[in-house]
Image (cartoon, grey):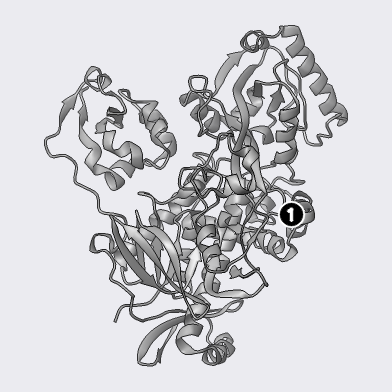
Amino acid sequence: MASPHVIIIGGGLAGLSAAHTVLERGGNVILLDKNSFLGGNSTKATSGINGAGTATQRKLNIPDTSEIFYEDSAKSARDLIVPPLTKVLTYQSGSAVEWIQEKFQVDLSLVARLGGHSQPRTHRGKEMFPGMTITYALMETLEDIANAQPNRAKVIKKADVKKLISENGKVVGVEYVRDGKTYKESGPVIIATGGYAADFTETSLLKKYRPELWDLPTTNGDHCTGDGIKMTLAIGGNTLHMEKVQVHPTGLVDPNEPDAKVKFLAAEALRGVGGLLLDANGHRFCDELGHRDYVTGMMWKNKGPFRLVLNGKGGKEIEWHCKHYMGRGLMKHFKGADSLAKEMGISVKTLEETFTKYNEIARTKKDPFGKKFFHNVPFVPDDEFWVAIVTPVLHFTMGGVQIDEYSNVLTGNGQKLPGLFACGEVAGGVHGANRLGGSSLLGCVVYGRVAGATAASYLLEELSGNSAARRIGGIAGHLGGAPISISVGGVNIALSFDGASGASAASAGPQTEPLPTEANTGPEPKGEPKKQQKEYTLADVAKHNTDKDCWVVVNGQVLDATNFLKDHPGGKKAIMLYAGRDATEEFNMLHKPEVVAKYAPETIIGTLKK
């Protein structure tokens, strides 16, 4: 008899956090993702993950607490705050960060202050974008578990979930399409499908709730189409704050493609280390560390193009980011205010006056825009500068499925929809009217863990009956956390206990339909490297520089990425920037060297001739 499981829809950080938590609680999981790779939007997060009262903060003598973080989040959420949800987010933030650090060995040793935060609490590592680092760590660990213990964890990619299956008021499974075939899976469901900030479909939630934002560019992948919300509405679930869509002020403008619909994000951490925002005339126009909706609103009141300007100290503090943006052609480096002024089309005197005025504001702490924190000052004319053109972009949706503090999905009358849970951006109400920078990854981890724990407990209750589960939960404190095995109706169940959540289980029961055999376990099987490999010169590679014929060089290997372009998690454009060229430096800034052999060995066609 096949083992029943918790079904997780979505393989970003929220879904991965939920999967690991179910496994920790003794449960089994099947994770379904409609993309060719896991990661979702989480891999794009550039500033970090918030945490209050962490060991890292204590080491840096940062006097932060959950209470202070709650107050900061409440100010950002304004009149739309849902106190129980915000309290879970903030009070579990420290343990969430330390879970990532300790369980997955992720470096989060640097801490910055982002807009709206009264304390530095946004954690990141010394290299790579934190979203990618964190998400990849959870992804690779889950895939290792799926390979080693296929009875415990299964990962199925290119699985497009079309509907939730409900019976007698309970959610009992999902129906999904893969390679043109329809499959069904039975079990409680965790929705972790992300938001709708790229929902340009015929049934667009974005167009329904915020039509005036329809023409804005977005930072989101094309998978962010509100699928989980639409499926939940179809079976009677409720939504909350759907009109609240966050427009981030600093999407990076590519000078070669200024009107691109999808834009890369300039991390808020760039302003956290002291970056200034200047209008077309070279003047400041806002508190750079204000809430995102405030900064965006001030941009719309002033004249662009707008530039984000870091001085030498600021650029050095966040040098990895700056080098990455330069590699993508999205940021420029200038030596001296005269060259920057020439680029902006203004007089160097105007720029120097802006710097002088800002330095005096930083000294007196009296800013007409209300800025309170000043980092890496002064700005001096003979310094070096890192500069990017920025514009408002669709970035995050605060609205989503209504949940309670245990991640249970609710109906319009506030009742639970049994068997259905939600976490991450798909869940509404967690951030209120506006999300603070650094709280997106945090929401994924905190509520992913909450949803995983609640779903695992629900699975046990369904198998053993509510009364039996309560009796078992009552003796949990006497078991010292040791897993035990029991039999319910002839089915063996492995139990683990957690003092806060009661019992959870790895349970058993038939699936509605068998899994597609080619996607039974772990990472999707990939083709072998092409056998007839040969040596190529850079001149040979340079001939293959279009999206119909795209070669790149990575760590001495020549890759034919033509058929991979559509599946690349970072988008087609990220590869096309290096079509016909050596992409090694940029690749190694974002990936481990073994990534190609692990996930796309079929692209390797030869080696670079030395």
Q: Is residue 103 visible?
A: no
Is 147 located above or below residue 419 in the figure?
A: above
- Quarter holding the C terminus? top left
Is 142 located above or below residue 438 in the figure?
A: below
Could you tell whether 488 is left or right of 558 in the image? Answer: right
Could you tell whether 122 is left or right of 356 in the image? Answer: left
- Quarter holding the N terminus? bottom left
- Report the amino acid beneath label 1: Phe
Q: Secondary structure at mark 1?
A: helix
Q: Give the x, y percent position of residue 438.
A: 63, 47
Q: Is residue 432 visible?
A: yes
- Residue at 16 percent of width and 39 percent of height: 530
The foreground one among 308 and 270 is: 308
Q: Quadrant of residue 283?
A: top right
The foreground one among 182 and 595 is: 182
- Residue at 84 percent of width and 22 percent of height: 360
Residue on which the image places disc 1: 69
Is 465 located above or below residue 417 in the figure?
A: below
Crowding near the residue tagged with mark 1, few <14, some 14–19, many ≥20 C-alpha atoms within 10 Å: many
Q: Give the x, y percent position of residue 306.
A: 66, 23
The foreground one among 479 and 247 is: 247
Q: Give the x, y percent position of residue 230.
A: 52, 58
Q: Quadrant of residue 335?
A: top right
Q: How many badges with numbers are in the image?
A: 1
- Residue at 29 percent of width and 47 percent of height: 598
Q: Quadrant of residue 596?
A: top left
Q: Residue furthest left?
A: 532
- Residue at 55 percent of width and 28 percent of height: 322
Q: Give the x, y percent position of residue 391.
A: 62, 29
